[in-house]
Structure formats: structure tokens, C-alpha cells
Amino acid sequence: MVEKRTIHGSCHCGEISVTAQITDDKVMACHCSDCQIFGGGPFRAVVIASADNFQMKGYPKEYVKVGDSGNSRIQAFCGDCGTHLYAADIDKTTFNIRTGFLAERHQLIPNRHIFGKSAFSWLGKLANQDWLEAGPGSMPYDGASLMKAEPPSAGE
Ligand SMILES: [Zn+2]
Ligand SMILES: [Zn+2]
């Protein structure tokens, strides 16, 4: 039995905040082309919570997309700052919360990657690419050691 814990986060402008009770085995990364287009990046990571484990303050904007499966999926984001918040089924029984805006994002390690067939081919080469500590012109950073790093402790 995996222990349930509370996670929380706010969008960039602070209008919307989310709290949820999750287990660490419910984290996954999605490499589908919709996630790439919505996210403007290679993939999006989510942690899944049922409606009774999900609380929100504020009112996100919702966009409904129809997936390849024919299912409608709500894509919720802050209408002011654009932060991606969650995806949900139309009845909002389950929330796939984007880990990127959560305070605990570094501890939420995906244990499954879905839509590998559309994943960016360079992801596997990250460790050997040219890393800098911060912005352009900053100190070199050891990307290879990052790839080997143990995930930070979840505070057990
Ligand atoms: Zn916002
Ligand atoms: Zn996706």
C-alpha cells in the first residue's frame, strides 16, 4: 500500500491554486502530440487524483479536446497566465494534475511514460548535451550527473 500525501501548487499569477491527496505511484509522463502542442515542450507529466481528493480555488479556463479515442477531455489552464493545471473527463471524476506547477514537482517522478511512439527522439541523449547552470553565459553544469541522480527524498 502506497501512502497518500498532500500536494499543492498555484499558477504563475497566483489566481488559481490546487491541493490534492495523491500516491506517488500515480505519476506519469505523456508524450502524445497534443501534450507537445499544448505544452510547447517535449512532454507533460501528471499525477492522477480522484475528484474527492482534489480541491481548487479559482476558476480556470477550460478547453475541451476530442482525443484519438473519441473521448472528450477537459484541458484546464489559467486564463490569465496560461499555466497548465489539469486534464479531466467531462464528468470530472478524475483529475490529471500537471506536476509542473506543484510545489512538490521534484519529488513527483513518473513511473510510466505513455505515447512513446510520439516521444522526442533526443530525450535519450539529454545527459550528453551541453548544460549550463542557469541562463546563456552561465557556468557549465554537469548534465550527466543530473541524469544519474537519485530522486530527492519524499520526506519519509
Ligand atoms: Zn494564473
Ligand atoms: Zn498527452
Image: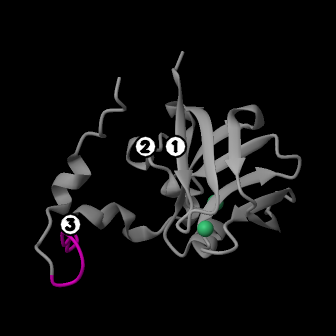
* Quadrant of picture, ligand 2: bottom right
Q: Is the residue marked 3 within 8 Å of ligand 2, measured from its CB?
A: no
Which residue bears the numbered disc 2? Answer: 109
**Residue type of the residue flagged with mark 3:** Asn
Left or right, 106 with respect to 2, comes to left
Rounded to the nearest angstrom, the CA distance separating label 1 from label 2 is 9 Å
Rendered view: 9 above or below 5: below
Residues at badges 3 and 2 in contact (C-beta under 8 Å)?
Answer: no
The residue at the point 61 percent across, 42 percent down is 19
For discs 1 and 2, the disc positioned in front in the rendered view:
2
Rounded to the nearest angstrom, the CA distance separating label 3 from label 2 is 21 Å
For discs 3 and 2, the disc positioned in front in the rendered view:
2
Label located before the other in sequence (3 or 1) = 1
The residue at the point 62 percent across, 73 percent down is 82
Q: Position of residue 42 (x, y in %)?
A: 49, 69
Which residue bears the numbered disc 1? Answer: 112
Q: Position of residue 31 (x, y in %)?
A: 56, 61
Label located before the other in sequence (3 or 2) = 2
**Majority secondary structure in the magenta region:** loop
**Residue type of the residue flagged with mark 1:** Arg
Which residue bears the numbered disc 3? Answer: 128
Closest to the observer, 51 or 65: 51
Rendered view: 86 above or below 110: below
Q: Which residues are magenta?
A: 129-137
